[in-house]
Amino acid sequence: MASDITYQCSIHKLWLDEVIVLENIFPDINKVEISIEENQNSKINKMFIRFYMQNVKNLVEAETLLKQPLNYIVDLISFKFNTSIGNPYLINANIPGQAIGISQINASLTVKRSLTEKQIQEFKNELTSKIVESSYLPLFKAAMQNTEPVSRFMFLYSILSLALEDLNQKDTVSQQEIDSFIKQSAYWDSKKDRPTANPRKNGAMETIYTWLRNQVGHTKNNSDLTEVTAEIESEVENLCEIVKLAIRAIP
């Protein structure tokens, strides 16, 4: 017998012009539909993920089957499109002999950004790749859930450090090693490098990302903090991309 279960979660900075349909990607799941609903009046956005299955006996069995695919989908959307996504929760279940409906909770939408056909196809392809199994995707999603730029930046920098430890098979990496990795990416601009504020490093230069990381918590006054926050806001998206490069580089 056919069954379907729908989950809902909040989503920021992303919009779908059409429903994404995934067929026969996950074992024992016939189809998945991903859609986003926009409320023009209140600017509230919701993402829905509906799974279609066969021969599911009850809700417990269905949720057990769907736990991993649901996490893969949500984590990969956050990772691939640098978007903040809330934790998904069940809102509807149509199982033979059972019918469950739960009241919906809304979440705020900040910026609307539509996906291209190419991006949607890349997303579908990556759902069957090893990247969805990375333990760093849930961490990345957690970082993106920080709507405050400074908190998000610091979380992302910590993930970058952890990922480079794995990549280099070391217990710890120095900020110099982090900067060396950053300088290999397209997101490094040597013109933005700054002299370190650490007197023990004799004026060595740091990338803007490491310099901003070190500035947080060490500003002298509110004016400094305002300037640092403004720079972080302009650099946090590039740091997202650097973190993703490190995660993807791990064998």
Image (cartoon, rainbow, N blue to C red):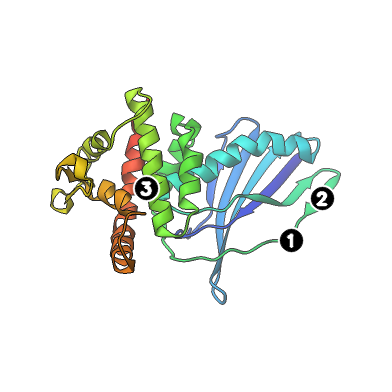
Residue drawn where x is 68% and y is 34% of the image: 65
How far apart are labels 1 and 2 at the CA level?
A: 14 Å
Amino acid beneath label 1: Ser
At label 1, counting other C-alpha atoms closer than 10 Å, the crowd grade (few under 14, some 14-19, many 20 or more) is few
The residue labelled by disc 1 is 103
Picture coordinates of residue 63, whole percent (x, y): 71, 39
Mark carried by residue 118: 3
Residue pushed farthest top?
Answer: 169
Residue drawn where x is 38% and y is 33% of the image: 163
Q: Nearer the viewer, residue 234 or 129?
A: 234
- Looking at marks 2 and 3 on the same chain, the residue that comes earlier in the sequence is marked by 2
Q: Quadrant of residue 69?
A: top right
Amino acid beneath label 3: Lys
Mark carried by residue 99: 2
How far apart are labels 2 and 3 at the CA level?
A: 37 Å
Q: Of helix, strand and loop, which one carries label 3? A: helix
In the displayed structure, 232 sits above or below 67; it is below
How far apart are labels 1 and 3 at the CA level?
A: 35 Å
